[in-house]
Image (spheres, helix red, strand yellow):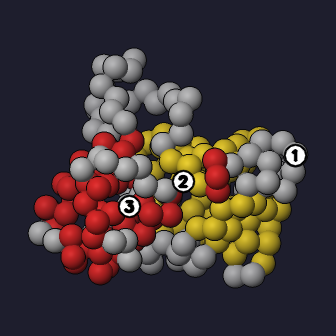
Amino acid sequence: MNEVGVELIDIHERVGQNLQRIRKRKGWTFDKIAEQTGVSKGMLYRIEKGETQPTITTVWRIATGLNVSFSSLIKQEAEVVTVAEQRQTPDLEEDNGRCHLFLIFPFDPETKFEVYTMILRPGANYHSLPHPEGVREYITVKSGEFAITLHEKTYTLDEKKHIQFSANVPHQYENRTDAETVLQLIMYYADEG
């Protein structure tokens, strides 16, 4: 249990429960989800059963194919008041553990956004797939420096520079320094299907 009395469950179990809830709500089969996401039916089945922990890229593929927010797949049901405390273990990892993603606040249908902390270790290089139309990313650098590439143009940002962009294009996060970089990401969804 955390400070507000919500029992925490492992991320792979949360993803599985949320995938099953969304799949049943939409009335979709594993075949239909596999067709829409490019993730194999077998992998989707194992994810839904909580037998495997998907990567960030896999969760994005599923979210995009289902036309739902990223955090709707990794969130845990919360109380009316939520005190968020970043855990020691990231919700998801990428780039051989050099990119860590922590869900802080899951998608809220009223505000239409979700909040994450991303930690990029030295040498981290994460390629993000395009998100659905209407998704915007707002990134604040809490510490360190990183480069983000959009439309073949690279922007180098630190604690004094921040960025927001339409996330329906491929984008790449890189930590080209010898120090860890900590980012706060806000994902805004114009439409949640």
Give 44 or 57, whichever is nearer the viewer: 44
How far across and down, in percent of the image, does residue 72 sit? Answer: 34, 54
Residue at x 39% of width, y 17% of height: 3
The quarter in which the N terminus is drawn is top left
The amino acid type found where label 1 is placed reads Asp
How far across and down, in percent of the image, does residue 112 sit? Answer: 39, 57
The crowding category of the residue bearing disc 3, from other C-alpha atoms within 10 Å (few below 14, some 14 to 19, many at least 20), is many
How far across and down, in percent of the image, does residue 174 sit? Answer: 75, 60
Q: Are marks 1 and 3 in contact (CB under 8 Å)?
A: no
The quarter in which the C terminus is drawn is bottom left
In this rendering, the label closer to the viewer, 1 or 3: 1
In this rendering, the label closer to the viewer, 2 or 1: 1
Q: What separation in Å lies between label 2 and label 1 (alpha carbons)?
A: 25 Å
Q: Is residue 135 left or right of residue 67?
A: right
Q: Are marks 2 and 3 in contact (CB under 8 Å)?
A: no
How far across and down, in percent of the image, does residue 11 sit? Answer: 39, 42
The crowding category of the residue bearing disc 2, from other C-alpha atoms within 10 Å (few below 14, some 14 to 19, many at least 20), is many
Please tell me which of labels 2 and 1 falls first in the chain.
1
Please tell me which of labels 2 and 3 falls first in the chain.
3
Give 1 or 83, whichever is nearer the viewer: 1
Q: Which residue is mark 1?
A: 178
Residue at x 64% of width, y 56% of height: 95
| Residue 81 appears in view | no
In this rendering, the label closer to the viewer, 2 or 3: 3
Q: Is residue 174 left or right of residue 21?
A: right
> Does residue 76 sit above or below 48 in this rendering?
above
* SS at badge 2: strand
Q: Which residue is mark 2?
A: 186
The amino acid type found where label 2 is placed reads Ile
Q: Which mark is residue 69?
A: 3
* SS at badge 3: loop
